[in-house]
Image (cartoon, coloured by chain):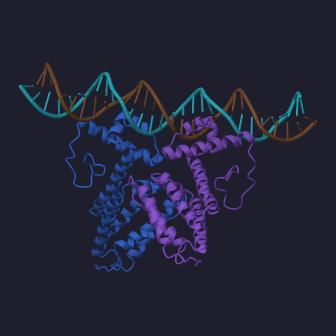
Chain colours: A blue, B purple, C brown, D cyan
Amino acid sequence: MDDQQTATAQGPREAAAPKPLRADAQRNRDRLVEVAATAFAEQGVDASLEEIARKAGVGIGTLYRHFPTREHLVEVVYRREVEALCAAADDLASHHPADVALEQWMQRFVDYIATKRGLAASLRILFNTNSAVFSDMSGRVSLALRQLVEAAVAEGSIRSDIDASDVLHALGGIYSAPDTKDWRDRSRRLVKLLMDGLRFGAGKGGG
Amino acid sequence: MDDQQTATAQGPREAAAPKPLRADAQRNRDRLVEVAATAFAEQGVDASLEEIARKAGVGIGTLYRHFPTREHLVEVVYRREVEALCAAADDLASHHPADVALEQWMQRFVDYIATKRGLAASLRILFNTNSAVFSDMSGRVSLALRQLVEAAVAEGSIRSDIDASDVLHALGGIYSAPDTKDWRDRSRRLVKLLMDGLRFGAGKGGG
DNA sequence: CACTAAAGCGGAGGCGCCTCCGTTTATTTA
DNA sequence: TAAATAAACGGAGGCGCCTCCGCTTTAGTG
């Protein structure tokens, strides 16, 4: 995740040498992504690029050299966040009982989605333009979820007659829920409810 | 079609009094639509609004008063063109044998689509935002087509074992064809081919 | 360390977007 | 026709986008 370029959509066949950036360039690039992540979260994907550059302490020209279009920048930020979400799965799994890890991860998922609501339209454009990005990312997310669910089933802390895709389906309901003011709270409750259901009748000795 | 406002998406229930525009306002509005139609056709929907205003001989403020967003203007232009296309159907029908009218209308349809290729993405945004526009417009187009087809069948100049929806389906193929350089020519040939097929085995005395 | 080429920087400049509001004009009323 | 007023005009101004290119910094070489 901290690797340098996260090359923007490699050409169709093979990934040519990504070529290491000069130290200062790398620093600026990281700064820009960092600032952009905040800006997009706070103001949506229409946040001013000039302001992002300013806050990152670089010239607008530098921003454009690294990210020739707004979409490039959005994509990199989006990837980074999905990867952080997936990394959190491993982290939670190694510090908590499996069912707790699952629950906390789902709550974090809700938080993540919360920042993306309203950006749906813009993201949809991105996905239409480059649908590989979307399938790649959603693949990672569902992999992370599957591992958490399977661990919890194996541990016997949730019931064994469901699988990851059922849980994903339930989370899908969260995403498509109308965008009301109390969306976040309702979603958190929904996750709790879901966990209660999952824990109910868990075989103490595993599936 | 020369009516004044072509109100931009009336509220959900009922159309309130559209209120006549002042004479100068009407004149400016018409001018803007006229110029915009040309500009969009030549440069795509990203044509400069300031330049459109300039060419129409009005200030940018006037343009924005009439069309608060770019999409409003695009929509009005789009409607106007669809209506012209449909009106052409009646006109052709009353000046030519039905099969000739049908053929010429389809060629004109190809021309129309030709100007819209590449704008697909922008139009899709419009339709996502306001899908009523799309269904309304496509309804008009298919009505026009149906009348032409039925007249030709009745006249006996094309075969009677097909109907308008078959023809529409064939035209759909044209639209979704890849956007190559020779698209227009290929489409014209396709229309000819389609007409040959339609004429083949036409009952001389009607269906 | 000095030197150099390549890589990177950054902001001025030109353009477009859109809002705001003082000025102009069409229409109504007397 | 003149006055009154609501409607419409239009462009200056502030901001953002993006390109272009002269200047600076880094990484390599002797």
Quarter residue C10 falls in = top left
Q: Is residue B88 above or below residue C17?
A: below
Out of B5 and A147, give the one closest to the viewer. Answer: B5
**Along the horizontal axis of the image, is B187 left or right of B8?**
left
Out of A81 and D3, give the one closest to the viewer. Answer: D3
Residue A199: x percent and y percent? 38, 75
- Let me know if residue A57 appears in the view: no
Out of B134 and A19, give the one closest to the viewer. Answer: B134
- Residue at far front of view: B204
Query: Residue drawn 43% across and 47% down?
Result: A40
- Let me know if residue A129 appears in the view: yes
**Along the horizontal axis of the image, is B135 left or right of A12?**
right
Q: Is residue A202 above or below residue A187?
A: below
Q: Number of labelled discs?
A: 0
Residue B26: x percent and y percent? 70, 43
Quarter residue C1 falls in = top left
Quarter residue C25 falls in = top right
**Along the horizontal axis of the image, is A23 left or right of C10?**
left
Residue A207: x percent and y percent? 29, 80
